[in-house]
Amino acid sequence: MTTANLLAELKKTRKAKNLSNLDLISVENITLDDLELILAVARVFKKFITDGAKKCDLLKGKTIVNFFNENSTRTRSSFELAGKHLGADVINLAGSASSGKKGETLGDSARTLDALNADILIIRDANSGAAFQLSSLVRASVVNAGDGWHEHPTQALLELLTLREKFGNKKLTYLFVGDALHSRVFGSQVRLYQKLGFELRLAAPQTLIPKGVENWGVKVFYKIEDALPGCDAIHAIRLQTERAAGKFVATGREYSKNYCLNLPRVALAKKDAVILHAGPVIREFDLRTEVLESPNCLVQQMVENGLPIRMAVEWLLATNKTKKKQPW
Ligand code: CP
């Protein structure tokens, strides 16, 4: 597909629509129309990539900053590649190498990047609310690439694209297993899947269940074997040890014995049930290798779908003619 054909396909798909927000902070700010627009545009980019093309110059002259104050393999790489595939100038700034280490506040670092005319600022930070705070301080569109325990919206979007490829628009019975309390991925997924009318279940020890989770329509189970029958999709959530989650279980070994996904457990779900994990996977602790490498495990497909989803988000935000007001 040439760039001209790609642009024509994108315009046909977009139908002159824009996302309803100039930032992407939370799934709460994504309407159902926004959701279908992102997925439709991502499918066009996915075809462009899978046809063998990589580069186009749709965002030539735009600047995208990846400002990552926490470790990342998947999210940072795919946001960076997305920007580069779109022809934007991409700057990667790690918190450990930024002037934050000299005492500059996160807001002042963001204002500095904004003064250099960044069009999109992608932020990952250990503090919940960091992306929201920055969104009111800068002219650039802010994309939340994971903030503390709060949300990681593009991770939920790439998973939904993956589920749609397998199940179409079916309302799924979907089971979360593990550390929902500290998981920002859970924070975005639960908001997204509630909007879509999924039947939601969570299997976890009592100490790792967020307060009020029933208000999102989630049915809680303490025993994974009770939760699995009838499930279409099972998402294993990593124990978020970097957020001290290890203190919320008696021992890691006991937690893993009770909640690690192995083949006999997966066999309790529906025959074609899929296995999901946001990564990084802790082999033999969250998932047995036999499950990770089984045909119904969609972990690699999720990673692949991260690229077109992030291309879609960056393209839709950077080409929105409405701009944010000067905040200062
Ligand atoms: N899923 C996810 O956010 O992975 P990374 O921490 O590697 O970006």
Image (tube, rainbow, N blue to C red):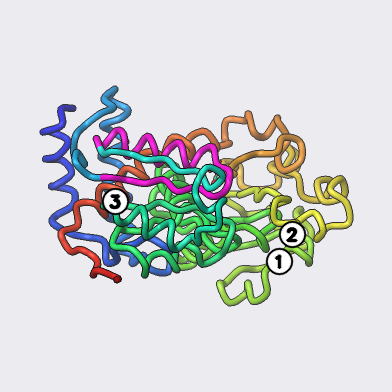
Q: Looking at the picture, which amino acid does disc 2 mark?
A: Ala
Q: Nearer the viewer, residue 98 or 81?
A: 98
In the displayed structure image, the side of residue 80 where residue 239 appears, left or right? right
Residue occupied by mark 3 = 116
Where disc 2 sits, the SS reads loop
Q: Which mark is residue 209?
A: 1
Residue 312: percent from left, percent from top: 30, 46
Q: Residues within 10 Å of mark 1 (few under 14, many from 20)?
A: some
Q: Which residues are magenta?
A: 63-87
Please report contact status of discs 1 and 2: CB closer than 8 Å, yes or no. yes
Q: Kindly identify the residue that appears in the image at 32 percent across and 52 percent down.
A: 120
- Mark 3 / mark 2, whichever is N-terminal: 3
Please report contact status of discs 3 and 2: CB closer than 8 Å, yes or no. no
Q: Nearer the viewer, residue 239 or 115?
A: 115
C-alpha span from label 1 to label 3: 42 Å
Q: Looking at the picture, which amino acid does disc 3 mark?
A: Leu
Q: Looking at the picture, which amino acid does disc 1 mark?
A: Ile
Q: Which mark is residue 204?
A: 2
Task: Between label 3 and label 2, give the one nearer the viewer.
Answer: 3
C-alpha span from label 1 to label 2: 7 Å
Q: Kindly identify the residue that appears in the image at 29 percent across and 51 percent down.
A: 116
Quarter of the picture holding the N terminus: top left
Residue 40: percent from left, percent from top: 28, 48
Where disc 1 sits, the SS reads loop
- Mark 1 / mark 2, whichever is N-terminal: 2
- Mark 1 / mark 3, whichever is N-terminal: 3
Task: Between label 1 and label 3, give the one nearer the viewer.
Answer: 3
